[in-house]
Amino acid sequence: MAAIIEVENLRKSYGSAVAVDGISFTVQAGECFGLLGPNGAGKTTTIRMLYGFTPRESGRLRLFGTDCDGAWRSIKAKIGVCQQEDNLDPDLSVRQNLETFAAYFNIPSNLVNDRVMSLLQFTALEGREHANVMELSGGLKRRLVLARALLNEPQLLILDEPTSGLDPQSRHQLWSRLDDLKQRGLTTLLTTHYMDEAQRLCDRLIIMDQGKILIEGAPLDLIQEHVGKSVIEVIAPCSELRQVLKEKGVAYEDVGQRLIIYSNDGESLYRDLLGEHCREGCMLRPATLEDVFLRLTGRELRE
């Protein structure tokens, strides 16, 4: 399988602040690849370097098998970008926003109408083509931004927090469209703060923090490796419970009024703890990618 993105020792600083600190990864054709991390981890800087918006300080960057230096014009023609902000033209209708954007790619006029109508249908916006974008809900705007990113029929789609701020119904609508694109073989790079979204959509992902890559792999593999199959949450744990867990060699996090216990044998451990050590409340649940994220990047608030 050919690599669509090849990143080697990519670095970017702003003065004395290092935003991206020598990261390396590849994205294969047809993959949905996730780029995760807390605020300030370097995700946005990384993707801006990938589509040529921010110049890199050092490192090697190849897209579609081509070194990016001196080839950005041809490379950008193959990329669609769904930015975090809804930077649509408020003075234009839904259809006019798409037609205007099509002109930037010199799409022949005889193809524009068919392509616009096809994308309006794909994003379920065909009944809104003459509406002003200011009349649209947040979910409809995000679908329009996705349609716009697909106008040039890209080989690589970059999605920067595509469902941020959307209600559950709108998120699932957008996920359905992204599933369709994945089935068509479109390569996708996704950044998101929703771990359930990354776990559902991504074939592989990296988690970054402070400009460095902490881990890389398939979501389920990372969950098994760093957390296990199950998580037990204990409310108001007694001091004896901590000692029991240490004696059993069970991994856990102490977050004050709760213990987060990680286990591959959660049901058996849950039964052992339930009677004597879970007096206030005890919950057994499957481990998730969010558990991995919090365990690696911490639980403190970020600026």
Image (cartoon, grey):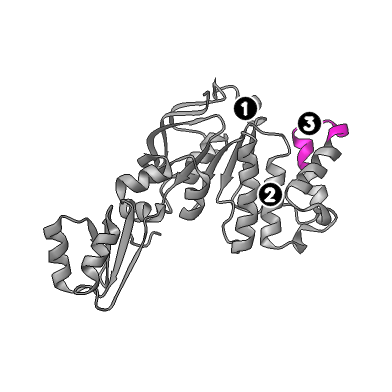
Q: Amino acid at mark 3?
A: Asn
Residue picked out by circle 3: 106
183 or 64, nearer to the observer: 183
Q: Amino acid at mark 1?
A: Ile
| Label 1 – label 3 distance at C-alpha | 15 Å
- The x, y position of residue 230, in whole percent, is 33, 56
Local crowd at mark 3 within 10 Å, few (<14), some, or many (≥20)?
Answer: few
- Amino acid carrying label 2: it is Val
Can residue 16 be seen here? The reply is no
Whether residue 287 appears in this view of the structure is yes
> Which residue position holds label 1?
75
Q: Nearer the viewer, residue 32 or 53?
A: 32
Quarter of the image containing the C terminus?
bottom left
Looking at the image, is mark 2 or mark 1 nearer the viewer? 2
Q: Is residue 114 magenta?
A: no
Query: Does the residue at mark 2 contact the one at mark 3 (Cβ under 8 Å)?
Result: no
Q: Quadrant of residue 279?
A: bottom left
- x, y percentage for residue 269? 24, 61
Residues shaded magenta: 100-111
What residue is disc 2 on? 145
Please determine whether, in this image, residue 244 is positioned above or below residue 163: below
